[in-house]
Image (cartoon, rainbow, N blue to C red):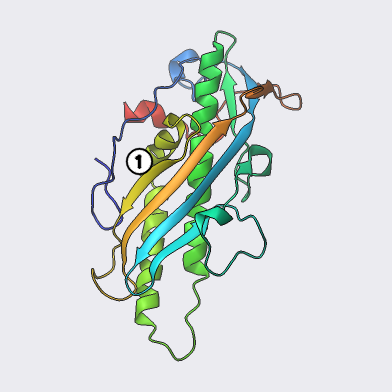
Amino acid sequence: METGAGGECLAGTTEVVPRDPNCAPLEHEAGGEGVAPELGTRYTCQGEGDGWFVADVVGLGKQISCMRYAVSPAPEDPTTADCVPVPFASIPLDIPHPSACCTESVEPEGILSTCALDCGYAACKIASAKIRASADGLVIPSGLDQIPYKRARADLYAYASMLESRPGLALCASKAAAAGGQIVEISLGGGVSKKGALGHIEAAHLYLSCALDPDEPYVIDADRPTCTGAGNIPELELTDAE
């Protein structure tokens, strides 16, 4: 079972969303060991993702950070009302546009489920990068005790590292993909710093959604119509998790 940054159990199952065997990452037996898997068709997934991070900090209360803000610069004390969806075409941080690489044997449902999972991985990569950036950018006001800020920074780094780990990323992506376009709550547990101390993050929650376009959830990539691998889904991650 996957654990939170402070050693607490993450809420929910650790099962990975079942994949379609006709979509990447393809099993090596498709071409035999040492042989490239079967060439597939690349589908560009269409839709949008949404999300925010909530941390309950001792001495500061509830702190909210959006994956994307409605205005720039971001408000000083944002709420979830300040968060807006991110179109797949506008995904930041050089994270690949969600896509599906599938063989000619795939059914439409297989492309849809792969798009949802690839979006889940993209959303969780954005979340971990945003949390790490928050830790990097945490400013300690002049004249104030540095220790509480250092505690909060350590906790944020721990959450980012957990989401960047292979099992943590797989669980996060699976939950986002399985929510069917709705916002899903992912509990990250308590922080690694001293419990009850000023600056300690008592509990953190990630809220994510991956909503495919209901009218046209995917199209064949005209610029790169063929492929051999997935977009954001790690190679062999699903096989390893079985």
Residue on which the image places disc 1: 167
Q: Considering depth in this image, is 152 or 170 the residue closer to the camera? A: 152
In the image, 65: left or right of 45?
left
Q: Secondary structure at mark 1?
A: helix
Q: Residue furthest right?
A: 223
Reply above or below: 169 against 197. above
Is the C terminus in the top left, top right, bottom left or bottom right quadrant? top left
Other-residue count near label 1 (Cα within 10 Å), few / some / many at <14 / 14–19 / ≥20 = some
Residue 111 x/y as whole percent: 55, 19
Figure quadrant of residue 150: bottom left
Label tally: 1
Taking the spot 47% from the left edge, 43% from the top edge, the residue there is 208
Decide if residue 179 is in sight here.
yes
Residue 24 x/y as whole percent: 52, 23
Taking the spot 51% from the left edge, 54% from the top edge, the residue there is 80
Residue 176 x/y as whole percent: 44, 36
Figure quadrant of residue 202: bottom left
Residue type, label 1: Pro
Reply above or below: 120 against 147. above
Residue 206 x/y as whole percent: 42, 49
Q: Residue furthest front?
A: 81
Reply above or below: 237 against 33. below
Taking the spot 64% from the left edge, 30% from the top edge, the residue there is 46
Q: Considering depth in this image, is 49 or 106 the residue closer to the camera? A: 49
In the image, 234: left or right of 147?
right
Figure quadrant of residue 220: top right
